[in-house]
Amino acid sequence: MERIDKAKLLEWLKQRSQKSYATTFINSTYKGVIEEIERGTFDPDPAPVPTLQKGDKVRHKDNKYIGTGVVLEIAKSGLRAHVDFSEIDDWDKVRLNWAPYPSYYRLDKLIKVEG
């Protein structure tokens, strides 16, 4: 997805709508687009957060070398999970010079695995 700077776009639209050659129709069109942008109509949807439960097996999206972990608990905020990656001995001992240990990880960084 491409991103556009909202402030720059609004500034550009407002400048265009104030030009002397702009007709009433063009001005109302610019103003309509400005209102929709300010209302948040075109804001991106939030990333879906996976639903995980205690005991689910997960992998980390960014750190694939730590292997499969087990969810110990979901934080009260609902945004992080306490995961033990050392419980299942499939972490990459060659690429990691440390053993994975239980820690809190963002839910959007975890992928649920079957089995």
Image (cartoon, helix red, strand yellow):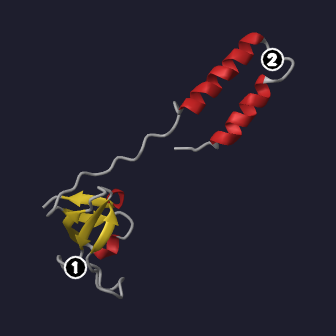
Q: Please say if 10 is above or below 77.
A: above
In the image, what residue occupies the spot 53% across and 33% down? 40
- The total of numbered circles placed on residues is 2
Query: Which percent across, then down, holds residue 48?
Result: 35, 46
In the image, what residue occupies the spot 76% across and 23% down? 17
Q: Residue pushed farthest top? A: 24
Q: Which of the numbered marks, if any, corresponds to residue 25?
A: none
- In terms of depth relative to the viewer, which is nearer, 47 or 39? 39
Query: Which percent across, then down, holds residue 95?
Result: 36, 82
Q: Is residue 57 left or right of residue 28?
A: left
Kindly indicate the quadrant of the structure image that contains residue 61: bottom left
Q: Which of the numbered marks, if any, corresponds to residue 22?
A: 2
Q: Is residue 65 left or right of residue 12?
A: left
In the image, what residue occupies the spot 72% across and 11% down? 25
Kindly indicate the quadrant of the structure image that contains residue 6: top right
Type of residue at label 1?
Ser
Query: SS for tag 2?
Result: loop
Type of residue at label 2?
Ala
Q: Please say if 45 is above or below 80.
A: above
Rate crowding at label 1 as few (under 14), some (14 to 19) or many (20 or more) other CA atoms within 10 Å. some
Q: Quadrant of the C terminus?
A: bottom left
**Residue at image mark 1:** 86
Query: SS for tag 1?
Result: loop
Query: Which percent across, then down, holds residue 70?
Result: 19, 68
Q: Residue pushed farthest bottom? A: 97
Q: Please say if 26 is above or below 1.
A: above
Query: Which percent across, then down, holds residue 104?
Result: 31, 69
Rate crowding at label 2 as few (under 14), some (14 to 19) or many (20 or more) other CA atoms within 10 Å. few
In the image, what residue occupies the spot 17% across and 77% down? 87
- Determine whether label 2 and label 1 are within 8 Å by CB: no
Q: Residue pushed farthest front? A: 76
